[in-house]
Image (cartoon, helix red, strand yellow):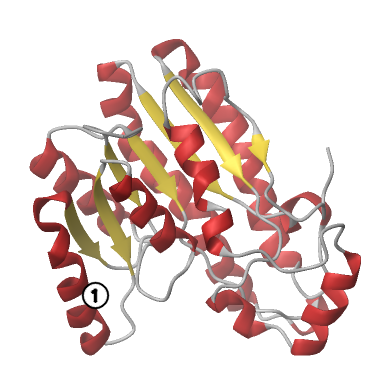
Amino acid sequence: MKLENRVAVITGAGPGGGIGYTIALAFLQEGAKVSLNYLARNDEEKETFEKEMNQYADKVIITEGDISQEEVSEKLISNTVKKYGKIDILINSAGISTPSLLQDMKVSNWDRMMDVNLKSVFLTTKSVIPFMVSQEFGRIINISSQVGQKGSVEHSHYAAAKAGVIAFTKSVAREVGRYGVTANCIAPGPIETSLMNEVSETWKQEKMKELVIPRLGEVEEVAPTAVFLASSPDGDLYTGQTLGPNSGDVML
């Protein structure tokens, strides 16, 4: 198993079959222990998810809460270290998407997008780096988007945040590379997740016409990229890079 004895923190990993959730399952399958964060919509969802994760026993812990809040981020990291004694891998997958034309966009909408999609990445990375540096090993993997590379109508705030994640990741890679820590991005194309519920069926059909591989991706097609980057020796020489399982939407 590629990730045996590794400990991974994964944000945005709640129920619903999103990218973070699917990465968590892939990591468990590869032998990792995982510390998950997500923001529950209600108590029933929280209870159901905790029961689902109970099947993995000591291989999973959950810290529920809004990861864009500093106290939640710090609690997530401290809970992980307290339980497992270390953190080897950080996956920043928390994200939201609320389409809006720029002229109609509320400042509160912009601010929330930046908080969840960019500020949370800063908070968790800042908290985890001292542990990774001290052990001279770490893998930071941030989920960005092809929208952060090319822009998109009604998604200027989302694009700005995701582009910020890419630039942030490059800077982190340069800061911590000498300590055995790598930092990379995954920038998926349009993927069938709950975020796609925010766009119309017409938008989906038009988008598929633009893609070189003319279909939306599945979350199971993104998770292997995270396993690859987190694994050694597979991902050892990758840092500051943006890998794009994106159906050919962006070619670099």
Q: Is residue 92 above or below residue 6?
A: below
For the C terminus, give its image quadrant. top right
Up-down relation of residue 185 to residue 135 (above or below): below
- Residue 171 sits in which quadrant? top right
Q: What is the x, y in percent for residue 100?
A: 73, 81
User: Could you tell me which secondary element the residue under label 1 belongs to?
Assistant: helix
Q: Residues within 10 Å of mark 1 (few under 14, many from 20)?
A: some
Q: Is residue 234 left or right of residue 192?
A: left
When the figure is inspected, residue 101 is found, relative to residue 90, above or below; the finding is below
x and y percentages locating residue 221 in the rendered image: 58, 55
Label 1 belongs to which residue?
A: 49
Where residue 198 appears, as percent x and y from the top left, is: 64, 83
Q: Position of residue 73 (x, y in %)?
A: 30, 53
Front one among 191 and 177:
191
Q: Would residue 12 be visible to someone looking at this image?
A: no
In the displayed orientation, state which residue is furthest to the front. Answer: 1
Q: Residue at x 64, y 56 (%)?
A: 161
Instruction: Tell me the amino acid under the disc marked 1.
Output: Phe
On the picture, is 206 further left or further right than 129?
right
- Give the residue drawn at x 34%, y 84%: 41
Q: Which quarter of the picture shows residue 68?
A: bottom left
Would you say 221 lies left or right of 236 here?
Answer: right
Instruction: Tell which of 196 and 59 is nearer to you.
Output: 59
